[in-house]
Image (tube, grey):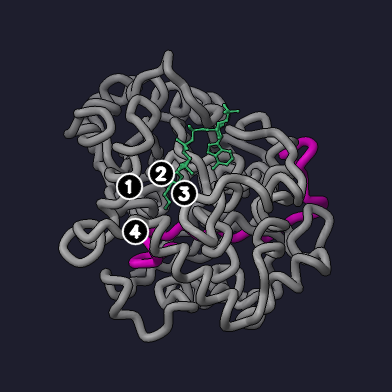
Amino acid sequence: MVMRKVAIIGVGMTKVGHLFSESLRSLFSKAVRSALEDAGNPKIDALYVGNMSAGQFNNQENIAALLSDFAGLNGIPATRIEEGCASGAGAIYNGFKAVASGSHDFVLVGGVEKMMDTSTCDATSIVSTVTDQEYEAFLGLSLVGINAMVMRLYMNTFDVGREPFAKFSVQMHDNASKNPYAQFPFKTSMDKAMNSNPVAEPIHLMDCAPLGDGAAALILCPEEYAKKFTSSPVEIIGAGHGMDTFIFHTRDDFLSLKAIRDSARDAYRMAGITPGKVDLMEIHDSFSITAFLTIEDLGFVEKGATGQAIDEGLISLDGPLPVNPSGGLKARGHPIGATGVYQMAEVVLQLRGQAGARQVPGAETGLTNNISGFGASSYVHILRG
Ligand code: COA
């Protein structure tokens, strides 16, 4: 089958945070309106929306029909994609395929999660449903718990302390301080990051992404139509989807995420590039340890060497490979099912040169990585401006 080239012609985001005065539908509609306006109001043919858990967070299911109706898109095919924390990237992947295959021309891809109407205790339990209910969550093992065990193993294996992880978080908050959409746009220090409250040792508060509300949207169309709507289309040149065993304890290697490696391999192959050609990336730093494993599994740094690379300035905004110029999940925020869409919206703004104070100068190629659970699945997308 001949695939069409796919471009992104519009992006929209709400600020992430405790948005008590917004509902699931009002949040989503805001992001959709901004994306449509940004794209010059094309007529949309289909909608894909990523959402992890509206049933549990908001007591609302059947949300593709609900959200398309309230966003003014009634009558077009609308589909919800649920793939845990990777629901947003799952929606993008499906929207990409719909345009590439010729099924639809103008596709709106959105993501939304409204998590803050729930207590932290209930939210932790809902988030834990992305792990195995029979072997993990039932026994009290939360996602924070899994990440804590892996962080301890990483620290022991590579003889590193908590400092490199804290340094990563300080960098994320620094980036977020330049992002008007960020949930936590405050700067922090090594001292504060190191001495923040323990959550599950060795993970402390400043190693964790927060809970948050937010929605983001993108408009995709065939590249041949894009120039009619924008002078700066951004092309999706690579896409990959990888999977791993669902249960964490059955993995061959606890310090490497196969789903990331497989999705990256396929995305690099489709794009026809090597990791060295990537100018910036938005990755899934749900916990600082996840960011370290990801940077390594995407092929940028040897196993165990991320801390040293951070010390040498690799991931800074003015470094050779800026990571999460948005502030990442840590500080931009992680409204779970919307996160993959936020990541791509940020890379689009960067490649258009519209990222304001956090702009990475001259960026031409960007990568996004969104994973579910502890890497049960992973998406990598590669974009070119
Ligand atoms: N980083 C920095 N500050 C944070 C924070 C975070 N991750 N989470 C909360 N805070 C701040 C709040 O702004 C608040 O500050 P204030 O007192 O100045 O207003 C304070 O810490 C307490 O906030 P609260 O909402 O009561 O935190 P909490 O203790 O209820 O929850 C966590 C904190 C870390 C337990 C919660 O954010 C969490 O579970 N995160 C992980 C979510 C997760 O697993 N996501 C899925 C990954 S795929």
The residue to which callout 2 is attached is 336
Q: Which residue: 50% across, 59% down?
A: 201
**Of tags 1 and 3, which is closer to the observer?**
1
Q: Does ligand 1 reach within 8 Å of label 2's beta carbon? A: yes
Label 1 and label 3: CA atoms lie apart by 16 Å
Q: Is residue 288 left or right of residue 76?
A: right
For mark 3, give the secondary structure: helix
- Which residue range is magenta in the image? 353-379
Q: Is residue 349 above or below residue 14?
A: below
Q: Amino acid at mark 4?
A: Ser
- Frontmost residue, 256 versus 110: 256
The label shown at residue 340 is: 3
Q: Amino acid at mark 1?
A: Val
The residue to which callout 1 is attached is 127
**Of tags 1 and 2, which is closer to the observer?**
1
Residue 299 image offset from top left, x and y in percent: 60, 77
Bin the neighbour count of mark 2 within 10 Å (Cα to Cα): few under 14, some 14-19, many 20 and up.
Answer: many
Q: Is residue 329 left or right of residue 94?
A: right
